[in-house]
Amino acid sequence: MPVASALVCVRCSARYAVDRFADDCPACRSAGAPSNLTVAYETSPGDGLPRRETPRRPGFQPRSMWRWDGFLPVAAADAVSLGEGDTPLLPVPGLGLGDLWIKDESRNPTWSFKDRLASGALSMAKRFGARVIASSSSGNAGAAAAAYAAKAGLPCIVFTFVGSAGPLVLQMRAYGAMVVKVADKADRWRLQSAGVRAFGWYPTSPFFGPVVGSNPYGMEGYKTIAYEIAEAFDWSPPDWCVLPVCYGDALYGMWKGFEELRALGWIDRVPRFVAAEVSGSLAAAMTGGDAMPPDVARNAPSIATSIGASQGTVQSLEVLRRSRGAAVAVGDDDLRRWVVTLAAKEGLWPEASSVAPFAAIERLRADGTIARHERCVALMTASGLKDPGPIEAALPDPPLVRGGLTELMSALKDAYGFDHG
Ligand SMILES: Cc1ncc(COP(=O)(O)O)c(C=O)c1O
Ligand SMILES: [Zn+2]
C-alpha cells in the first residue's frame, strides 16, 4: 500500500500538504481555471508488485476493488467496503457500434459506479477520524455516501434539491442518511461548506463552486476501473474509453489508473478518452482552447439528470487534452433511444445518463474520429431502476386482457405488434 505524500494540482502540478480533504488549487483559481487536487504517493502505486499475481492473494478475500490496494492509500483490511468493483466487462457486438464492450457498473452495491468513490472516501474518512459525512448530490453519489457511511457507522447528511429523482432520494433515506432538500442548487454548496468549516463534516462530494471535482481520496477508487479493464484485456488496453461525464471524477480517476499502469510498464499505451456530456461545455472548451470550460445554460433540463451540470471541470479538460480525446454533447432523443435499445437488445437497463457514451460513440464512429477497427469501452455508470421515469413514456402500456386466447393474441398484436404470422 503506497503512502500519500502530497496533494497535487491536476493542472499545474503544484504540491500541497496531505490533508483530510481538499479545496482547489489557489494558483489555478487565481489564473481563472479552478482545479482539483489529486493524491501523490511516496512510492509509485503498484511499485514492486508483479503484474499478474498482484490482485491474487492466498486465503479468503471478499471480491472488491480493494484487491488493488497496492495502488490505493488504504489497506484492504482497513477499507470500508461493501464488495464494490470487480464488475463485468461485456462484449456487445450486436449494437452496430463496432468493437464495443460495456463495463457494467450498475452491478455495484448501490447500483452505481459511485460506490468506488464512496468506498475510497469513507475509508480515508475513518482513518482521519471523521465524525460526520456530508455530500451534496442529486442522486448516485449521495446514495453511495449514505450506504458507506452506514457501513462505517457514521452519520451522513445529504443535500439534494427539489426535483431530484424520487427512487434515488428514497435510497439515501433507506440507508439512514439525513436528507435535506434545498430550493436552489447553489445553496447546497453554501450549507455544506459552512458545515465543513464550522463542524469538520467530512465532504465526499464537491462542496463549493465553481466545482472542481470530488474528494481526492474517493477519486482514487476510480483508478480500479482502469486496472480491471486492463487486466480483463490481458494488459492490452482498449483504444477508447467513453464515459458519461459531469464533473469528470471517474474520467480523471480512470485516466490516472491507466497512466500508473503505463508508468509501471504493465501496459504500453493509455486509451484515448471521450466525455459524453449534456451541456456541451467541454466540447466548447475543446474547440475554443479555453482554460476553463464555459457555463452553458440550458433552456430545459435534460432527462440525464445525473450529468445535468451546465459547466464542465478543468480535470475533465486535462484528461481530454492529454489523451487526445474528444467531448460530445448528447440530447434527450438519443438518450431515450439508447436506453430502450440496450434494455431490449442486450438485457441491460441503464439510467438515462449512462447511455450517453453510446450516443457519443455512434457519432464518433460515423464521423471517423473513432476508426472502424478501434476497440471502445463504454462505462455504464448506473442502473435504470435509479431513475425509471424517462423511459416509461417510451414504452407501450401493458394491455388488460379479460377473455381467452383470442383476446390475448389480439391484445399482444395491438400493444406490441406481436403476431405468430
Ligand atoms: C449515473 C451517473 N453517470 C455519470 C455521472 C458523472 O460522474 P462524474 O462526476 O464522475 O463525471 C454521474 C454523477 O455525477 C452519475 O450519477
Ligand atoms: Zn494548479
Image (spheres, rainbow, N blue to C red):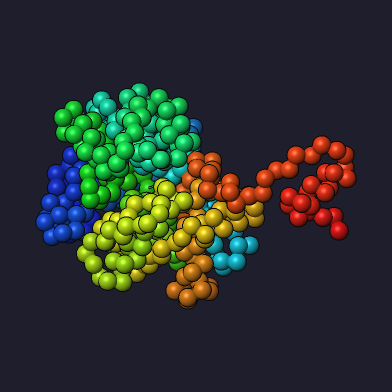
Residue furthest bottom in the image = 368
Image quadrant where one finds the N terminus:
top left
Task: From this view, report whether residue 16 is shown above or below residue 376.
Answer: above
Residue furthest front in the image = 299
Task: From this view, report whether residue 92 is shown above or below residue 77.
Answer: below
Which percent across, then down, holds residue 59?
48, 33
Residue 193: image quadrant is: top left
Q: Nearer the viewer, residue 102 or 278?
A: 278
Image quadrant where one finds the C terminus:
bottom right
Q: Nearer the viewer, residue 3 or 373?
A: 373
Instruction: Name which residue lies at 16% across and 30% down.
Output: 198
Which percent across, then down, holds residue 225?
42, 50
Q: Nearer the viewer, residue 167 or 297?
A: 297
Instruction: Name which residue lies at 60% across and 66% down.
Output: 96
Instruction: Name which residue lies at 28% across and 49% down.
Output: 213
Which percent across, then down, holds residue 45?
30, 49
Instruction: Tally the marks.
Output: 0
Q: Is residue 341 visible?
A: yes
Left/right placement of residue 183 relative to residue 27 reads: right
Instruction: Name which residue lies at 45% across and 51% down.
Output: 304
Q: Nearer the viewer, residue 145 or 174?
A: 174
Left/right placement of residue 244 relative to residue 106 reads: left
Q: Is residue 110 visible?
A: no
Task: From this view, report whether residue 401 is shown above or below residue 155.
Answer: below
Which percent across, then down, holds residue 241?
44, 60
